[in-house]
Image: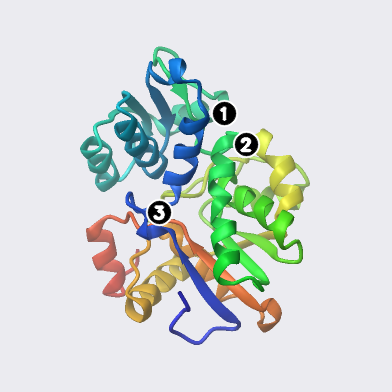
Amino acid sequence: MHLNAEGPAEIWLKLENLQPIGSFKLRGAGNAMGLADPDRLAKGVYTASAGNMAQGVAWNARRRGVPCTVVVPDNAPQNKLDAIARLGATAVKLPYARWWQVLEEHGYPGIEGLFIHPVSDPAVMAGNGTIALEILEDLPDVDTVIVPFGGGGLSCGIAAGLRALRPRAKVFASEVDTAAPFAASLAAGKPVRVEHTPSFVDGIGGRSMLPEMWPLASSLLAGSIVVSVEEAAAALRLLAERNRVVAEGAGATSLAAALKRSPDSGKTVAVISGGNIDPSKLARILHGEPP
């Protein structure tokens, strides 16, 4: 969809918020489960997620008739917890630091089944890469793609697909300044930890780069564009007012980043990664209140 507003370049929107679960996470979770050993899958699946990957795994688990457990941080938005319950999964809450440790350790003691890592599982990244195929179907001469950066699984999957089929296209991460580990790691030349400040942009912004993602992200991505919380909120309002698109905070950062780019960016695609925003937060942002 073309952005119905003037921008520094020709901006297009890849609307992953229109997936059945409201985010792109359906793709990677479905691919990982489709490639898994059936005997292992029968014991159930689990993941660690603030909400969207949880829904992706739960949706696919329900479709396949296998049990699903989700390890969530204790600050996970209630609307995402409600969605997890609707999809039939069991949520296990942990303090944020311990939850992040599950991502680093690729599992949590005491939970049976196949652990599907939301970021660094190769099958998950390959599933995410199908977005690149769809972008090229509709916009074969794309120049720039901007992707919200949580852990790098989405951006690296898309970048890998474009590297194979349109290597001249550049892929940038979009991050929010309340936690921008990829930008900080690029500046340091290695994975580093950063301060994490909670905000309405809850789908991205970890405390660090996962070490296993650093080689991929640093080689596949052209850089990171960091936006403020206010810029993300303004982009979210613009999407709603001009294109009638509801994005969550993370999903709006790609458009916020695209609006900061120079005119020589060419044809630019902002991947709107999800739309699972708490309605009360959305209402405040649409009214122009500080998010």
Residue at (72, 63) in percent of width and height: 166
| Number of the label disc, if any, that sits on residue 199 | 3
Q: CA distance from mark 2 to mark 1?
A: 7 Å
> In this rendering, is residue 198 above or below 124?
below
Residue 141 visible from this viewpoint: yes
Q: CA distance from mark 3 to mark 2?
A: 21 Å
Coloured how?
Answer: rainbow
Residue 255 shown left or right of residue 169 in the figure: left
| Number of the label disc, if any, that sits on residue 210 | 2
Q: Residue furthest top?
A: 110
Specify the quadrant that holds the N terminus: bottom left
Residue at (73, 56) in percent of width and height: 163
Between 160 and 219, the one nearer to me in the picture: 160
| Number of the label disc, if any, that sits on residue 104 | 1
Question: Of marks 2 and 1, which one's residue comes earlier in the chain?
Answer: 1
Q: Position of residue 165 (x, y in %)?
A: 71, 59
Question: Of marks 1 and 3, which one's residue comes earlier in the chain?
Answer: 1
Residue at (53, 43) in percent of width and height: 206
Name which residue type carries label 1: Glu
Between 150 and 12, the one nearer to me in the picture: 12
Q: Position of residue 136 (x, y in %)?
A: 60, 65
**SS under mark 3:** loop
